Amino acid sequence: MIRSRTDLSRAKRVVVKIGSSLLADESAGICQDVIDRLVDEMAGFMAEGLEVVVVTSGSVALGRVDQGWLDRELSVHEKQAAAAIGQPKLMSAYADAFARHDRSVAQMLLTKDDLRHRRRYLNASNTSETLFSAGVVPIVNENDTVVVAEIKFGDNDSLGALVSLVVDADLLVMLTDVEGLFDKNPARHSDASRIGIIEHINEAHIAMAGDAGSSFGTGGMASKLMAARVATKSGVAAAIISGSKVGALRKLLAGQDEGTLFLCGIDRQTKRKHWITEVLHPAGEIRVDAGAAKALLKQGSSLLPVGVIAVDGVFDKGDCIEIVGPNGIIARGLCNYTAEEMRRIMGHASGDIESILGFHDFTSVIHRDNLVLTSDN
Ligand SMILES: Nc1ncnc2c1ncn2[C@@H]1O[C@H](COP(=O)(O)OP(=O)(O)O)[C@@H](O)[C@H]1O
Ligand SMILES: N[C@@H](CCC(=O)OP(=O)(O)O)C(=O)O
């Protein structure tokens, strides 16, 4: 938990999100010098034991420069094509920069939707753990050729927030072309002043955040604040710092007054519950009778098969599902059985599961620890 700047020196795993505004130049294309410098800083921390994941933007910008598509708004398909052109250039720039420190890099192209499905989320998490063990640096970007909404809004800030949950990071650092969140857009107001620490993001902060400042940046401060909100609500602290200022990352991690820090004091259990209610998409629905609804709502019980009266959807073991009582949706949780198994055991006592399915993994359908109430009645 990061409750003050001094806690930052204890961070073990950090997601560093690097914006297009830092990496791409309209005439030169990729800013290899910037990547080299940022990689030198990150490699220094890795040598000291910090684990780093890079979430990088820039593929669309680099594709646009490559094709000379600069002075007009691109269609969605052109942006997707630009991303496909720019992505290998981006990877090769990181590979070259990390090779100078004898580190290999690995490309992870994800969509936010991937991370809302428990199985894909776990696969991404296992892949990144394997990469960490091998000392390889995961370099993540949105899989832009298969998404539409995200490429319109250019939302790598929120991808960074989700990745920080996937890898269970202590901190998400968003590197950009300004020194943090200012009380007004510093590109337009010379008297703007930086906000150093934010304990809870409120409407006043959101009102301060404006659009992108450069021709290549897309989400501006608004998308960084939204990402900081997702991260901090899920147990990961966040920071916005300048990527052009030499040593800013080191100062931040040393606990000095650098950039804007969003504190986070959430424990693991709250974090897991937030993941179930806010991040995962339910894959199906289970209807329960009044007795089961009461046991969940009033007695803090796990859900047993005997109280289940109907099962909707196709879901797998461990998927997130919604629980509906006589008065509507009451909870969400991770189901111990597949939809097909659920249809066979619903209405039966837990002691009958073995004879019906031929195996008996769990007494409950959803264990209390994996269940979050979303209503009172
Ligand atoms: N209140 C604010 N404080 C700081 N920067 C702001 C603010 N409002 C808008 N901005 C703009 O946000 C820009 C950074 O966002 P963006 O261009 O999307 O960067 P990136 O490509 O790094 O994601 C800054 O250059 C700045 O012009
Ligand atoms: N996936 C896109 C990211 C776009 C995006 O979010 O850009 P930015 O606002 O610079 O972080 C790309 O690589 O161009």
Image: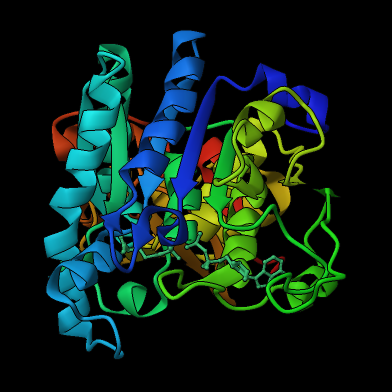
Residue 318: x and y in percent read 32, 43
Which image quarter holds the N terminus?
top right
Q: Is residue 211 above or below residue 127?
A: below
Q: How is the image coloured?
A: rainbow
Looking at the picture, how far across and down is residue 77, in whole percent?
15, 82
| Count of marks, rendered view | 0
Q: Quadrant of residue 126?
A: top left
> Seen in the image, is 312 located left or right of residue 242?
left
For image coordinates 68% across by 73% down, the residue present is 187
Residue 159 or residue 105, whichever sits in front: 105
Residue 47: image location, x then y, percent? 45, 9
Residue at position x 17%, y 40% in the image: 92
Q: Residue 288, can we see it?
A: no
Q: Can you tell which quarter of the image residue 376 is in? A: bottom right
Above or below, comparing residue 329 to residue 272 in the picture: below
Which image quadrant is residue 354 in?
Answer: top left
The residue nearer to you, when weighing 359 against 227, is 227
Question: Of residues 65 and 211, which is closer to you in this image?
Answer: 65
Q: Ligand 2 falls in which quarter?
A: bottom left
**Residue in view at x 27 percent, y 81 percent:** 70
Could you tell me residue 66's position as x and y percent?
15, 67
308 to 188, vertically: above or below: above
Task: Report the side of 44 relative to 116 (left or right).
Answer: right
Seen as rendered, the residue at the extreme front is 27
Q: Is residue 256 left or right of residue 369?
A: right
Q: Is residue 302 visible?
A: yes
Q: Quadrant of the C terminus?
A: bottom right
